[in-house]
Structure formats: structure tokens, C-alpha cells
Image (tube, rainbow, N blue to C red):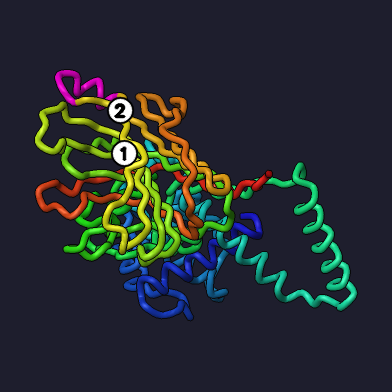
Amino acid sequence: MKDIDNSAFINLFKEACEKCFGHPLTEMLSETESKLLCNQLLEKTGLVIGPKSVKNYSAYVNNSSEAKAENPSVATLDTLARYVLEAPYTDEAKRKDNENHYPYWFEYRDRFSRSAKKSIANRKPINSFVLYLAGIAIVIAALIYFFLPGNKKSIVFEENFSSVSDEVLTQHEWTVQSKENTSWNRRNEKPGYLTLFTLKGDNWPDSAQSLKINNLLLRKIDSDCFTAEVHFKQFIPQQNWQQAGLLLLEDTTFNGKSVRISLAYNDFFGGYTRPKEILIQVITSRGKKDRMPEEVAHVPLFLLGGENETIFQNLNNTALRIEKHGNKLRFLSSSGSMENTAFKEIVSREIDIKPKYIGIFALKGFVDEAESIPVQIKFFRLSNDPCEN
């Protein structure tokens, strides 16, 4: 094994043992302990590692006199990583068909490598002259950035939800607000996706309800100009007010202004008889005290009737995008049977808001009648863009 692979394996095996036994690994595992760890691996991941191999690994990791050099397979490393990162349950056949690139091992190794490099950097002594030169370099870079707009580059964050463990989401700077444990614990039921559910709740001001969106996935926004988008897989709302989308917030308490774009279902027309619709909706609110939010856009994508099968095919892939440049916000959507369907503008509008957070949400409003259906999220992207005049 390469040095970094070997170091990552040793650390991974120690983490797996501590997760299983509740204390750090200090000596070679006994046969009974090895079997217990193997049973835990099978129970939590659906995958198998032999007790003899586990015992040999423990001897190697602890530099036992009985130890010999170990070179575990990538499949074994991936199994240990799946256990530590709390990956979705699977089996060998499914992993071979869907994840034969062993993503969890490489994710763990990359995380370990970044952590090791950071630790080494922190240990290196830095003399005052080097600090002086670094300070000058930072000042020069800042001047170039602010006074030469052509040199500005976007800072891009992308999330493909290959792992949705709490540890990985926290590492990627996500936070979960108003966590509803029963549904949140199902977030990884489809590998490669984050699964949310259209739970009861809303940020639509209502004097009779406390504003709350369960399992609201949030991250900070560091720029006044940015582009954000989210991609859904096979999300088809079919009851009022099932919806999912992106939410911009000035604060996390819903006191400040907010803007949201969502893929939603509607069959409420104030007494009029009209076809039920799946639509893109854009709503702004000035906060809790604003009892009458503004519907900036209400654009039907499909009217439900006799061609629902075709409609469902065209909602196989849906994406929503928000582009913000100062006070100008542009909202776009894409839907189709293919993943690369072009975005189309829904509306462009001047809106006075300084969002500090962006959230991915799923909800059904404050109604009990609608079901809480799954929303599979496969991709998120946020780029902090230059604010050019």
C-alpha cells in the first residue's frame, strides 16, 4: 500500500473498532472480539469481512509481535469506510452493480489526507520573515482582486451527496435546522442521493402556526452575488401543497426577509374549476410580521389530465436555479427525461434582500391531508460570483 493509503487504513480500522466497542483500540483483538466486529459490519453495511482478517488487521495496527504486513483489498477498505461513515445498507451484488468504484473508501482517504496535511502544516515553525512576506503577498493579492475585476474568479461549492452521514455533511459546512429524527434517519435510503420528505411546516407567515421547516438543510452565503442550483430526481408532487426547492434567508429564525423557488402542486383556485397543475412558484416574504407574502411567479409546467405518464417522464429530472447580482434576482428551471435539459427563465426581478443563508427544503404547508412523500436530491451547486458594475 502507498504510505497515505496505509496511514488512512490504520486510522480507519481504529475508528471502526472504537465505533464498535466504545473505546480506543489498545491491543490485538481476540477471536470473540473479531467476530463481534464482523457481525457489526454485516448488520450495519450488509457486507462481509472475515474474522481472521480482522484479527490480523488489529495485530498489524497495534504493531503486535504476531503481526505481518497487511494489504487489505479496496473492497474491504470500502466496507470499513461504509461502517464508519454510516453509509446506506447494501449487499455485494448491489455494490458491484452500483458502487464498484468504492466511493466511501476514497472519500474517507481524501478526508484523512486533507486532515493530515493540515496537521503537518500546523506543526511547521514559521519565522517572522516568512510571515512578513506572506502578509505582503496577501495584501497584493487583495489589491489585485478588488481593483482588477478581470482577475476575479468564482468560488464554487458542489455537493453530489455521495455520503449523507452527519459527519460528512458537517464537514461540508451544512447544518440541519428543525431536525425531525424519524424522517432524517431515512435520508440515505437511496444511495447517492439525499432524501428529504414533504413534512408538515412552512415559512409562509400564518398567525395560527409557528413558522418551521423540518429538516431544512442550510449553508452560509458569503457573497452578495452568486448562482445556486439544486437538482431533483423523479420528484412529482401530487397533492396540495407538496413542494421542494431553494430558500434564501436573511436569518435562520424567519424574522428577516426570504425568497424561495419551488417545484409544487396546486389544485386550489378559490372556487373556480381549473385543471390541477404542477408548477414553479417564486414567493417573497418580509418576515414573520408580513402576513401577505408576494407571489412573484406562478408558472404551470404541466396541467394534469389524461397524459400523466408523459408528464411524469418529463419530471424525471428537475433543476431549479437562482442567480443574484446585487438586488437583481433571476429564477430559472429545467425539467425533462434527460439530465441535460436546458434551463428556462421563470422570472427576473429586483428584490431588496441580503440573504445570509441558502436552504434546500421540502414541505407540504400546514395541512394534514397531503402525504409526506420523498424528495430525492442528487446535486447542489453554489458559486460566489464577482459583483461587477
Residue 169 visible (yes or no): no
In this rendering, is residue 21 above or below 12?
A: below
- Determine the residue positioned at 63% across, 59% down: 4
Instruction: Using a 10 Å C-alpha cutoff, classify the residue at mark 1 as few (fewer than 14 neighbours), some (14 to 19) or many (20 or more).
Output: many
The dominant secondary structure in magenta is helix
The magenta span reads 304-313
Q: Is residue 306 magenta?
A: yes
* Residue 191 place in picture, x, y as percent: 35, 46
Q: SS class of the residue under badge 2?
A: strand
Q: Which numbered circle lies on residue 263? A: 1
Q: Amino acid at mark 2?
A: Leu
Camera-nearest residue between 220 and 167: 220
* Residue 197 place in picture, x, y as percent: 25, 50
Camera-nearest residue between 191 and 94: 191
* Residue 275 place in picture, x, y as percent: 16, 26
Residue 376: image quadrant is top left
Q: Amino acid at mark 1?
A: Leu
Q: Quadrant of the C terminus?
A: top right
Q: SS class of the residue under badge 1?
A: strand
Left or right of residue 170, residue 10 in this image: right
- Determine the residue positioned at 17% across, 30% down: 276
Residue 333: image quadrant is top left
Q: Are marks 2 and 1 in contact (CB under 8 Å)?
A: yes
